[in-house]
Amino acid sequence: MGEGQLQLAMVKTDGRIDRDKRGLFSNVTEDTEMETFALTIPGSFDEECQKVWDEVFKAFNDGVIPDNATPEHPPSDTIYNDLCQRIGRLLATCANRGGLFANEDARLGRIDACINVIALLMFKARAKLDMFGEIGGSLGELGLADIFSASAASPTGGTHSLLTARWTCISLVAIRQMLKVDLLSELAQYAVSGLACLQSPFATSDEAALASAEAIDRRLEGAWNYVEELDRAFEPLDPSKPIPLPQVKEILSTHESDVSGLKDIGDENGVNDKVDWRISLLQDVMDKATHTLIRQLPGVSFNEFRRTEPALVSEAFIFHSIGTSPVLPQLVFLLQQLRSLHTLGRKFRNIMNGSHTGGHEMALRSLKSINQIPVQLRRLKDPMKRQLWRLRDLRDGCGLGYTVELFFLALRQLKETDVYYKQTFEDIISPWKDSKESFGTHQILLNLICDLVIQDRGIFSNYTYPEYITTRLLRLTVDILDGYQSDVGHVEAALRELQGVPRQQCFDRDFQSNAINQLRGIDAVSQDEGHVPAT
């Protein structure tokens, strides 16, 4: 029925475009008919029929389908809007794993049809996400596992098929909308104020939070220096043989400064736990607001908050990897990591004092477990400051920077080349003016640019992204920063870093040159070039 209707709709006659805007979608009612019809839609996006879709979408936006439609208040019975709503409802049925479908293949086939059609309508016919109804919940209920299964059963095949890419693109646009929740903004501020309180019990300012973040980064860097020095001290010994306690004490005594330094970086009063708890609360609410969609995106990693001390240091640093490259989560419990390193220092101090009751073998096992943590994750640039920028972006910038990071994380996992990536990025960043005054958003974008240029700098380093995406990222950054009325010291700092990269550490010299030229063109920077060294 659907194929015949489509063929009839495409017959070349006078007034075809006007008729197609109505005849293409009419009389499709039941789910089975809708699914059959949906399967025909991808075939209608050839060069000739694309004109029909362009006219349909233009007419919808112009408010001429039907005559009483307006761009501001499109009625629910608008034909194009009705088509999108029906497909959205059809997608919702795919979460039913009961008796609705004859078999699992039938359910997976409907998933395949719905995702492909929604992607086509969104990214080629320019339908808006909300025209499909509340599909964020449906996307989350299905999840990546169902998409992988549907991909394997689809003609394209493979877990990295176009279907996976399209589900990811739709999900990213949905996440961008779902992050615009007042409660998330409030909880982000709650986490920022928790950091500020580390300076003094009643501190709440962003400046105090930044001071705490910088202090945490220094402590974490120092802790790794101590731990790695201790690890090297025990390295010559045979790990397969027990090390006698007197020998352990002797080695530790020759590295007493490292043991003391490691013990002193911790928090004996549990204040740090409150900061991590606030961040975990934000993460939990974000999961609910986004129907766990973020957790299911390819290439995205998460840290878990532990209320008890991990047995091994490495347990506080368990992250997802893409191939051999570890992926640092966007929200990390860095104080939890510090606590695990501090606990190791306390155990070594007790061993030296003869008061350790847990057995020195377990302490040594914990020390050796650091070799399971990739070096890149021990030497990231300013991890707590970057987390603070994400919190401020969620608080002040509607999550624009956070979602842009998600896009880049997912993109490096999607091996297929898909024409929808460019439009997905545009949909994510399109309301960028709402984030223009968000300092956290500025910092996320500037750090992302620096990561793309400098090897091993951060979680986005060492990967080549499509040029049209990185070029658009630069333009977005300039658009947001241009005309910024406050201090532009953060832009100048990024410029200095980009200009000072040694040749052997530069991952992409063409992008480096482009980034420098673009950032130097920002009004506030170009008017104060004395602070920025010339290239």
Image (spheres, rainbow, N blue to C red):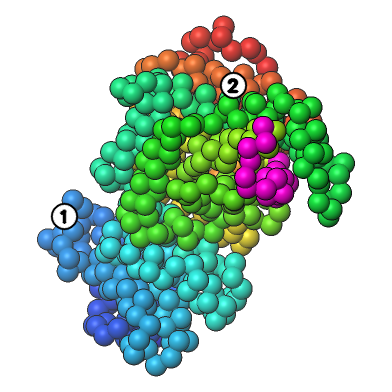
* Above or below, comparing residue 222 to residue 112 in the picture: above
Crowding near pointer 2: few (<14 within 10 Å), some, many (20+)?
many
Secondary structure beneath dot 1 equals loop
Asked whether, in this view, residue 519 is left or right of residue 189, the answer is right
- Please provide the residue range marked out in magenta: 353-375
Residue 73, label in figure: 1
Nearer mark to the viewer, of 1 and 2 = 2
Where is the C terminus found, in terms of image quarters? top right
Q: From the viewer's side, name the closer residue of 332 and 349.
A: 349
Secondary structure beneath dot 2 equals helix
* Above or below, comparing residue 340 to residue 495 in the picture: below
Examine the residues drawn in magenta and state their main secondary structure.
helix
At 31% from the left edge and 70% from the top edge, which residue is drawn?
88
Please state which amino acid type lies under the numbered disc 2: Leu
Q: Position of residue 534 (x, y in %)?
A: 65, 13
Asked whether, in this view, residue 477 is left or right of residue 161, the answer is left
